[in-house]
Amino acid sequence: MKHAPEGFVRLRDVDPTILEEVRYATPHNFTGDPVPGYDEPMCVLTRPLAEALREAQKGFRAQGYTLKVYDCYRPQPADDRFVEWAQNDDERMKAEFYPGLDKSQLYSAGYIAENSGHSRGSSVDLTLVRLPAPPQRAYVPGEPLTSCTSPAGERFPDNSVDMGTGFDCFDDLAHTDDPRITGQARANRDLLREGLTSVGLQGYSGEWWHFNLPREPFPNEYFDFPVNSAAFR
């Protein structure tokens, strides 16, 4: 059993009030299957990033919101699986996650990469949920899919506030400052970004949900320990 290096923590040990919906531990992701390396639906991060999220959460809770994470540390075998998947003919989840793109374009367009900051433990994908948090229903494999670019009332029901697209939406509408995103969805994206940049995190222009710790403790390492409790024993 590979253990988490010193410097990694479980987010729930730093701030248990932050909601966790780790999508890659479930079949509700663009591959349609749980992803290798995610043995448990648990958020693991480098300690400085977890502590930054704890500080941001204080501000969001004071405004009636909570953070919800979708992806945190990502074992390198997961990125390897994404690259492998991008080269096969499985398009079960196309209608939700990449309705406007041919699958062959995902790698060249940068949506799939061999290496990710997630595998260094200092990147996180997240959103905001209005308190008190409504329940979040589970995805049922095989259920009808709706485009991640559809209006909030038509997309898969996420208990988060409306951000203009669903999570992991491979479309230009997911670009943080896409001018077509207006009204409440624009205000929600700005609220998320302002709260996270105020604690030193840096957003990614191509994905409204993705934020990085600029001064990460492991800038040149990609880890492969699994996401499970045993890695912390």
Image (tube, grey):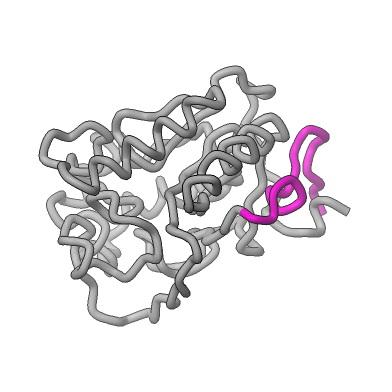
Between 122 and 208, the one nearer to me in the picture: 208
Visible in this render: residue 69?
no
The answer to if 48 sits in the magenta stretch is no
Viewer-proximal residue among 156 and 19: 19
The picture places residue 52, in percent across and down from the top left corner, at: 62, 32
Specify the quadrant of the image occupied by residue 107.
Answer: top left
Report the residue at 41% width, 29% height from top: 203
Q: Nearer the viewer, residue 154 or 101?
A: 154
At 68% from the left edge and 35% from the top edge, which residue is drawn? Answer: 51
Q: Is residue 129 left or right of residue 107?
A: right
Please report the bounds of the magenta region as a residue range: 1-17
Q: Is residue 46 above or below residue 84?
A: above
Which percent across, then down, holds residue 81? 47, 52
Q: Is residue 27 visible?
A: yes
Q: Quadrant of residue 7?
A: top right
Q: Residue furthest top?
A: 215
**Which quarter of the image is occupied by the N terminus?**
bottom right
Instruction: Name the side, left or right, on which 217 lies relative to 125.
Output: right
| Residue 43, horizontal then vertical, whole percent | 63, 52
In-front residue for pair 139/184: 184
Which image quarter holds the C terminus?
bottom right
Q: Residue at x 40, y 33 (%)?
A: 193
Q: How many marks?
A: 0
Using residue 207 as the reference point, say whether residue 98 is left or right of it.
Answer: left
Q: Position of residue 117 (x, y in %)?
A: 52, 32
Looking at this rendering, what residue extends furthest in the right direction? Answer: 233
